[in-house]
Image (cartoon, rainbow, N blue to C red):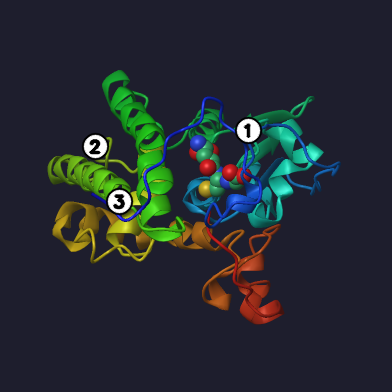
Amino acid sequence: MNDVPAYSPPKIWQWKKDKDGGRFASINRPIAGPTHDKDLPVGRHPLQLYSLATPNGVKVTVMLEELLALGHKGAEYDAWLIRISEGDQFGSGFVAVNPNSKIPALLDRSGPKPIPVFESGAILLYLAEKFGAFLPKDGATRAECLSWLFWQMGSAPYLGGGFGHFYAYAPTKIEYAIDRFAMEVKRQLDVLDRRLAQSEYLAGTDYTIADMAVWPWYGGLAKGRLYGAGEFLQVQDYQNVQRWSDAITGRPAAQRGRKVNCTWGDPSDQLHERHEASDFETKTQDKVGDGTAAPKG
Ligand SMILES: N[C@@H](CCC(=O)N[C@@H](CS)C(=O)NCC(=O)O)C(=O)O
């Protein structure tokens, strides 16, 4: 049926530390908690973000840039780079902010006691409530927005951990796994396409945190930016997703958000750390050094 040898699981699972587990295997562990002591850096702004420009990280930097574009000065932030391929997410300081050891993680230092927030959906909701923006106030529209936000949180692991992993990263191509997850991802694209045929944005006429959550994943996939899978999944067929993705890509805040904590691609699109709005003009890698390739999460 497929090209991998049959496998009978032993009675008790064992961690095979040295076996080739594909890309990112070196950072995968069956245990949580820190691996080393390391404090996190802290800048001068109220919000401290510890992240990397994977789709989950980009959701939050787009939101922060959108809030700043709206004039919310309290959304000023320092964005510190967490190199997940080097294990920065397992430092004691990071684990204190996010016990799940994954980017993005936010520390709100604007009040008397710092507030840690982890999980990108929770961070978007926290910021939307804090600033009263990008979350509809009317009950029905708010419910629609939260439904799509949580749809994204539940769906993207099938796209990233399922399809992306087996199509692009696993050491062997397993037909069963690729078929299973390609089917699911195409279904998800169709779910979005049907919604966006009825509505300009996911929650209705306004751009909200639901769009910010979904766009880095499915907007990127629709534009062939994820896993080199555009042709395989025939993404151009999802025309409403294409229209919506183009509209968000055209937003200056979304363009800035994509550059923050980015360590791959065109050097002019890489702003390794962001501490001031002017950093976009003066501190991208084409201005300060060479772009270094780093794996996407
Ligand atoms: N559900 C989490 C997922 C976060 C996540 O998977 N982050 C990845 C990068 S996209 C990560 O930090 N991986 C590092 C690791 O697994 O050790 C969220 O949305 O915040």
Residues 21 and 161: in front is 21
Q: Is residue 189 visible?
A: yes
Q: Which one is closest to the eye, mark 2 or mark 3?
A: 3
Residue under the image location 64 percent in, 40 percent down? 29
- Pointer 3 residue: 178
The reply to whether the residue tagged 1 has its Cβ within 8 angstroms of ligand 1 is: yes
Q: Is residue 273 left or right of residue 126?
A: right
**In the rendered view, would you say 171 is above or below 92?**
below
- Pointer 1 residue: 100
Residue under the image location 70 percent in, 56 percent down? 86
Label 1, label 2: how far apart the Cα atoms are: 33 Å
Quarter of image, res 235 = bottom left
Q: Which one is closest to the eye, mark 1 or mark 3?
A: 3
Element under disc 3? helix
Of mark 1 and mark 2, the one earlier in the sequence is 1
- Pointer 2 residue: 204
Residue under the image location 55 percent in, 50 percent down? 61
* Amino acid identity at mark 3: Ile
